Structures are given as structure tokens and as C-alpha cells.
Image (cartoon, rainbow, N blue to C red):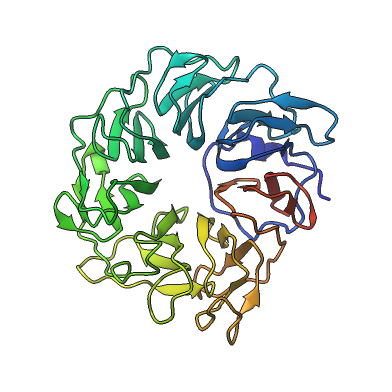
């Protein structure tokens, strides 16, 4: 029942390298989300912003309950819920990104914010929950599932049709579409084109989704885009790892991805079902960012044996994975524990070099699964749909500190 958060931690705004694995004992100061699911977490200065599909939150002691429409915020240092940040977001929030000047970008599947028509993407003031009026992204025709921001550029992915199909780069201040970014995903595996996840470094944007091409080039479910100097070009990086099919109910099965702090590699997690063989269904895979060629293979693969993974966070010391998995190190499992499998209920950590599960094993109720991680300088925030984390009550949101 760790209760102390280092002051330096609240100053972080982006994930940084961790020198070691986080504690398995979550802090006691985080508030609780009382219903629904948490889909995304971001950090704006010392304020944690949480998005998902929910209607009520409570403070850490469960003394006070507050109505919140799919998004709320709290102090990382104290866990205090921001009373005046209570925007009325009219639908699920799937993605968040930190803005400047006490603002946050909110993406999802909603028709309005505070009663004003605002489709799928908005920029909100943390002080009072009002929308920033000068931000007008013009997103329509679908939802925003993922956001990534660097400086003056905001990347958005989803299944929207405007201002571009499923993937766009916007001006972070005005929301205007960047004409220099014209990378188009295509040839989807399902009728509706969708980008599931984005991850960004100073040089490369990683994109995964149900597409099989980027700008007409073969990129089955995963691709890298060179964005150095504000440009946009599909990188000479292609893998066939996600060409093989999983279960019919998962025609596209890539989900979360995240870069290492130094950008040299990234990890991808998948769903897909208990399918035997070399297919990367229900797995975590590491790839090297600067490999080149048409048949790049994973550095390593770690399989759950038939349970979905949705979220991943790479800190250098560990690769944290979350979903509703029962095991890791389980390549021979088929909805069962095969030889060498280790129990890692709902959350686990993998060694970045060996690809094998670390001993870190806090546990959590499985439910639908972890949908959100946020690694920052002081620890790891976790968002899901269940109420037990680290063998304690932490409803849908929790934080593991660096010891």
C-alpha cells in the first residue's frame, strides 16, 4: 500500500526511460472509476487525465462521488479529483494527448462536447472543461481511436473519413490539416478502414490497423512512416509477421504499440484467438525501428497461449503488457498453460532483450482487459475495466511507482 509519489514525478509530461521495474504495490492515492472502462490516460504537467466510457468517479477514500461524462482529471501528487474539470463529452473517449497551456486533446466517438456539436476530436481547458474554440479539426465520418503529438503536430488515427481517411496530421493549435502529410492507409481487411494505434518518435511514426497498404505499398497491418523534418514518407520497413490469419472473428488483430524511450525498437501486442503455429495471434513482438527491407522479422515473440493483449508500454527496463491474459511464455498453450508458461493474470512485464517474462507479477482481475498504460518518470499508470489491481481495490485506474 505505497502512498508516496516523488515530487519529480509530477513534472513529467512524456514517458521516459526507467532505471528498473516498477513496484508491484500500487499507490493508495489514485481515485476510482465506478463504472464502465478506462481507454486512455495522459499526463498534462502534474495532472492525470483519464478517458473512457464511464459516468461516475470517486476519490481514493471513496468518500466523495462525482458525475463525470467519459473524462476526468486528478492530481498525480495527491489523487485529488479536479472539481471544475467536468466537460460533458457525449460519447466514449478512446484517446488523449497532452496539450500546451493546461489543455488536453480528447478523441473518441462523440457528437458533442458541452452541448455543442463537436465530432470525434476536441481540445479542452483543464481549468474549467471548456472547449478551445480556435481548435477546429474538421474530423467527421467516424471516430478517433488514437492520438500522438509532438510539438506543433498532432497525429490522429481512427475510422474517420474526413479530413483524410483514417490517418491525418493536424496543426496542434488550429486543427488544420497538414497538406504535407498525405500517407493513406488502404486495402483494409474489414469493410471499414481503421487505424488502431500510433506511436511517435522524433523521426518515425509507427501505425497499426486493419490496412494492408500505406500509400499503395504493401504494409500488412503495420508500417513505419519517416516524419523527420516535418516530412512524411513510408519507410523502407515491411514485415510479413501479420500476414497469416488468426481466428475468423479477428480478421485484423494488431492492437497496441509503443516505442522504446530511445526509439531504437518498438513492441506490438495482438489479439486473435488460440491459434497454433507460428502466427502472432495473442502475442507481444519486438521489432527494430531502423531495420530495412521487405521481410523484417521480430527480434522475439512472447505468446499468451490464446488470450488477447491490448496495451503495451516500453520503458527500457521492461515491456509492460496488459489485456485479459492468463499466462506469458506460453507458445505451446491453446487456451491452456503449455510447457514453460508462467501465470501473469491481466498484466505482466517482459524483458526487452530476452523476450521472456520478468518476475514482476502484481496481478489484476482480467475482465475485458487493460486498455491503457502511461509510463512516466515516476511510475506506470494503468487503466482497465476491473476493480482489483495488485491484490487491492483500485477501480479501473491505478499507478505502480518506481521504488
- Is 262 placed above or below 228 here? below
The picture quadrant where one finds residue 292 is: bottom left
401 sits left or right of 140 in the view: right
- Is 265 placed above or below 184 here? below
* Residue 148 visible in the snapshot: no
Residue at the spot 52% in from the left edge and 63% down from the top edge: 308
Residue closest to the eye, 202 or 165: 165
Query: Quick one: which residue is furthest to the bottom in this view?
Result: 339
60 sits left or right of 49 in the view: right
Residue at the spot 56% in from the left edge and 20% down from the top edge: 88
Query: Quick one: which residue is furthest to the left in this view?
Result: 216
The picture quadrant where one finds residue 65 is: top right
Residue at the spot 34% in from the left edge and 37% down from the top edge: 155
85 sits left or right of 99 in the view: right
Residue at the spot 26% in from the left edge and 30% down from the top edge: 162
Q: Position of residue 154 (x, y in %)?
A: 36, 33
Q: Position of residue 117 (x, y in %)?
A: 41, 16
Residue closest to the eye, 278 or 44: 278
Q: Position of residue 356 (x, y in %)?
A: 55, 75
- Is 210 placed above or below 304 here? above
Residue closest to the eye, 229 or 257: 257
Amino acid at each position: 500500500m505505497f502512498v508516496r509519489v516523488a515530487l519529480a514525478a509530477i513534472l513529467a509530461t512524456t514517458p521516459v526511460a526507467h532505471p528498473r521495474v516498477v513496484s508491484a504495490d500500487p499507490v493508495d492515492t489514485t481515485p476510482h472509476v465506478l463504472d464502465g472502462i478506462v481507454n486512455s490516460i495522459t499526463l498534462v504537467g502534474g495532472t492525470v487525465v483519464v478517458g473512457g466510457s464511464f459516468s461516475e468517479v470517486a476519490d481514493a477514500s471513496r468518500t466523495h462521488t462525482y458525475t463525470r461524462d467519459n473524462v476526468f482529471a486528478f492530481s498525480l501528487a495527491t489523487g485529488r479529483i479536479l472539481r471544475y474539470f467536468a466537460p460533458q463529452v457525449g460519447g466514449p473517449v478512446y484517446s488523449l494527448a497532452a496539450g500546451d497551456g493546461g489543455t488536453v486533446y480528447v478523441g473518441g466517438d462523440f457528437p458533442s462536447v458541452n452541448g455543442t456539436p463537436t465530432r470525434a476530436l476536441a481540445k479542452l481547458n483543464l481549468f474549467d472543461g471548456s472547449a478551445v474554440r480556435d481548435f477546429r479539426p474538421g474530423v467527421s465520418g467516424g471516430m478517433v481511436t488514437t492520438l500522438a503529438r509532438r510539438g506543433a503536430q498532432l497525429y490522429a488515427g481512427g475510422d474517420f473519413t474526413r479530413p483524410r481517411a483514417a490517418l491525418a496530421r493536424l496543426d496542434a493549435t488550429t486543427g488544420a490539416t497538414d497538406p504535407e502529410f498525405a500517407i493513406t492507409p488502404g486495402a483494409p481487411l474489414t469493410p471499414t478502414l481503421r487505424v488502431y494505434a500510433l506511436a511517435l518518435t522524433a523521426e518515425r511514426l509507427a501505425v497499426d490497423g486493419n490496412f494492408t497498404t500505406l500509400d499503395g505499398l504493401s504494409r500488412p497491418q503495420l508500417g513505419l512512416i519517416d516524419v523527420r523534418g516535418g516530412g512524411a514518407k513510408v519507410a523502407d520497413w515491411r514485415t510479413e509477421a501479420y500476414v497469416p490469419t488468426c481466428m475468423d472473428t479477428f480478421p485484423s488483430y494488431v492492437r497496441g504499440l509503443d516505442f522504446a524511450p530511445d526509439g531504437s525498437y518498438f513492441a506490438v501486442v495482438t489479439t486473435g484467438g488460440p491459434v497454433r503455429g507460428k502466427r502472432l495471434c495473442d502475442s507481444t513482438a519486438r521489432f527494430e525501428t531502423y531495420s530495412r527491407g521487405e521481410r523484417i522479422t521480430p527480434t522475439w515473440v512472447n505468446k499468451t497461449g490464446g488470450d488477447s493483449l491490448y496495451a503495451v508500454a516500453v520503458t527500457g527496463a521492461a515491456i509492460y503488457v496488459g489485456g485479459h491474459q492468463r499466462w506469458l511464455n506460453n507458445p505451446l498453450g491453446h487456451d491452456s498453460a503449455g510447457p514453460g508458461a508462467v501465470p501473469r493474470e491481466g498484466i505482466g512485464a517482459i524483458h526487452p532483450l530476452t523476450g521472456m517474462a520478468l518476475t514482476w507479477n502484481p496481478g489484476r482481475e482480467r475482465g475485458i482487459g487493460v486498455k491503457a498504460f502511461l509510463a512516466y518518470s515516476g511510475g506506470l499508470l494503468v487503466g482497465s475495466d476491473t476493480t482489483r489491481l495488485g491484490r487491492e481495490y483500485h477501480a479501473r485506474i491505478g499507478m505502480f511507482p518506481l521504488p
